[in-house]
Image: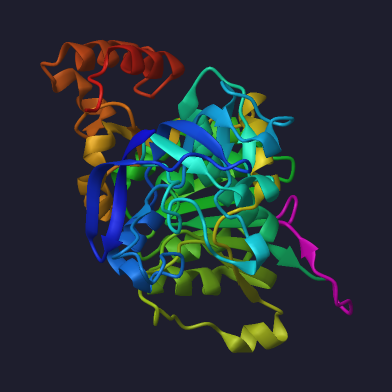
C-alpha cells in the first residue's frame, strides 16, 4: 500500500513524500486517515528535531510521520485484533501510549503512523494500550478534536488539593470554587472554557484572560456570560493589558484568590500572574509546554510554605480522558467546533506547521486526501473557487463554524491529493 505523508528528517526539515508501507503483521492494522488537526506540539517537534523528547535520534536516516490528532477508517485488520476491530470501523487514537514507560507516540516517533498521511500502519502498542478507540459519528473532524479535548480533560483532572492536617491529594478542580484560565482564548483555551462550563465538576467563578481584544470578543460571543450563568458559573473576561485588571480580578474573589489557575501560554509574566492569583491551597497548572528547555519564572515560596500553594504540569491526556471527551461530544455536552478557524489539505501541512505560531486564529484542520491551501473559514467568501464558494454558504448556516455538512461537501468535491 502506497501512502503520501509529511515526514520529519530534522530541525525544520519536513518533506511531503510518497512511499510504500510495509505489509501489516498479524498484530497490526492498516488504516486510512481522513482528518488531522495541527497542534503546536508538532511545531515544537519541527523546531527541535531529534532534540525533542519524542523524536528518535536517528530521524535523519529513518524519518517519522508528523501529526497526532487524527481520525479515519480501518482498512485491514491483522488476525490478533479481528475480534475487536473490523474494516470500515471509524477510529480515533490517543497518542500518549505510555507503553512500557516509553514516551514514543504516533505523530512523533513512528515511521509508519502519524496524522499527516493518507494511509498508516497502526502498531501493536496502540491496541495493547487500548489507545485505538472506535468512533461513531457522521463527522471525522470531531474525532480529530477528541485528542486536544482529552488534553484539556486530563488537565482538569490533574489539578489537586489537600485538607489541613491530611496528606491526601484530592484530584480535580474545586467544585464551586474560583478558577482562572490565563491566556485563555486560543483554541485550547476555548476548549477549556467549554469543558469548565459543561463538565460535571464546575467552578462557581470562572475568569478568562488574554491580551487580544479581537480574540476575547470572539470568545465572549461563543461562550456567553448568560450561557455560563445557566450552568451556575459566573464568567468574566479580562484583557490583562489593562493595569487595573489584576486588582479587578482579585476583587471578584473578595481578595481570597483562586483555587485553580490554568496557564495556557509559556510566557513568564503570565505564569507569575498565575502565581499571584493563587489563594490558600491554590493549584497552578502549567499547560503550555515551552520550546525553551531553560524556561523559568518566579514562584512565591513563602506562599508555598504558609498558604500551601502548588504547581502541576500536564502534557496530553490518557485513554480515559479521550473516552470522556468522545462521550461528551456524542452527548452534545461540549462542542469543540469553535476551535477550528482554518481548513487545508495535506499539501498545506508543511508551511502551516513551520509557521503555526504566526498564523492567527485557532485550530488548523487538515483533510489528508485533499489538495487545498490552508484557508481561513472567514476567507471562503473571497475565493473564486466554486468549492470554496459553496463552503462559504454552508458555514454561513452555522455562524461561520465548520460542520459535518461542510466536511462531507469538501470530501466529495475537493481536489484529491496526487
What is the x, y in percent for residue 395?
Answer: 34, 17
Q: In the shown orientation, is residue 97 left or right of residue 21?
A: right
Tell me if 407 is positioned left or right of 130 in this view. left
When the figure is inspected, residue 386 is found, relative to residue 418, above or below; the finding is: above
- The reply to whether the magenta stretch includes residue 249 is no
2 versus 274 height, above or below? above
Main SS of the magenta part reads loop
Residue 109, image quadrant: bottom left
Residue at far left of view: 384
Q: Which is nearer the eye, 399 or 245?
A: 399
Q: Quadrant of residue 325?
A: top right
Q: How is the image coloured?
A: rainbow
Q: Position of residue 202 (x, y in %)?
A: 70, 45
The quadrant of the picture occupied by the N terminus is top left
What stretch of residues is rendered in magenta?
163-177
The foreground one among 286 and 208 is: 286
Query: Residue 160, position in %: x, y?
Result: 72, 65
| Residue appearing at x 40%, y 14% in the figure | 408
Amino acid at each position: 500500500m502506497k501512502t503520501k505523508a509529511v515526514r520529519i528528517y530534522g530541525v525544520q526539515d519536513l518533506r511531503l513524500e510518497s512511499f510504500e508501507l510495509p505489509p501489516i503483521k498479524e498484530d497490526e492494522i492498516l488504516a486510512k486517515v481522513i482528518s488531522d488537526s495541527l497542534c503546536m506540539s508538532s511545531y515544537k517537534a519541527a523546531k527541535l528535531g531529534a532534540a525533542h523528547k519524542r523524536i528518535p535520534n536517528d530521524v535523519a536516516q529513518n524519518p517519522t510521520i508528523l501529526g497526532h490528532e487524527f481520525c479515519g477508517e480501518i482498512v485491514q485488520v491483522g488476525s490478533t485484533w479481528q475480534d475487536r476491530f473490523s474494516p470500515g470501523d471509524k477510529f480515533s487514537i490517543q497518542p500518549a501510549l505510555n507503553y512500557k514507560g516509553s514516551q514514543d507516540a504516533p505523530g512523533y516517533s513512528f515511521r509508519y503512523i502519524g496524522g499527516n498521511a493518507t494511509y498508516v500502519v497502526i502498531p501493536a502498542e496502540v491496541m495493547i494500550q487500548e489507545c485505538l478507540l472506535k468512533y461513531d459519528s457522521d463527522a471525522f473532524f470531531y474525532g480529530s478534536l477528541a485528542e486536544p479535548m482529552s488534553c484539556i480533560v486530563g488537565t482538569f483532572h490533574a489539578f489537586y488539593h489537600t485538607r489541613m492536617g491530611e496528606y491526601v491529594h484530592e484530584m480535580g478542580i474545586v467544585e464551586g470554587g474560583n478558577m482562572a484560565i490565563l491566556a485563555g482564548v486560543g483554541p485550547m483555551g476555548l476548549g477549556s472554557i467549554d469543558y469548565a462550563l459543561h463538565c460535571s465538576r464546575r467552578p462557581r467563578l470562572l475568569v478568562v484572560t488574554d491580551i487580544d481584544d479581537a480574540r476575547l470578543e470572539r470568545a465572549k460571543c461563543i461562550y456567553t456570560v448568560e450561557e455560563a450563568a445557566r450552568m451556575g458559573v459566573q464568567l468574566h473576561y479580562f484583557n490583562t493589558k489593562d493595569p487595573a485588571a489584576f486588582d479587578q480580578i482579585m476583587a471578584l474573589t473578595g481578595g481570597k484568590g483562586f483555587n485553580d489557575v490554568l496557564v495556557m501560554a509559556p510566557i513568564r509574566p503570565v505564569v507569575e500572574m498565575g502565581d499571584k492569583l493563587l489563594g490558600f491551597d491554590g493549584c497552578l497548572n502549567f499547560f503550555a509546554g515551552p520550546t525553551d528547555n531553560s524556561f523559568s519564572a518566579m514562584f512565591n515560596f513563602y506562599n508555598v510554605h504558609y498558604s500551601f500553594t502548588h504547581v502541576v504540569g500536564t502534557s496530553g491526556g490518557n485513554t480515559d480522558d479521550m473516552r470522556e471527551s468522545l462521550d461528551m461530544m456524542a452527548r452534545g455536552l461540549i462542542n469543540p467546533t469553535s476551535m477550528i478557524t482554518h481548513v487545508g489539505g495535506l499539501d498545506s501541512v508543511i508551511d502551516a506547521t513551520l509557521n503555526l505560531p504566526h498564523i492567527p486564529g485557532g485550530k488548523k484542520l487538515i483533510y489528508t486526501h485533499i489538495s487545498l491551501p490552508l484557508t481561513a473559514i472567514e476567507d471562503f467568501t473571497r475565493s473564486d473557487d466554486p468549492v470554496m464558494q459553496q463552503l462559504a454558504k454552508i458555514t454561513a448556516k452555522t455562524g461561520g463554524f465548520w460542520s459535518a455538512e461542510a466536511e462531507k461537501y469538501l470530501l466529495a468535491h475537493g481536489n484529491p491529493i496526487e
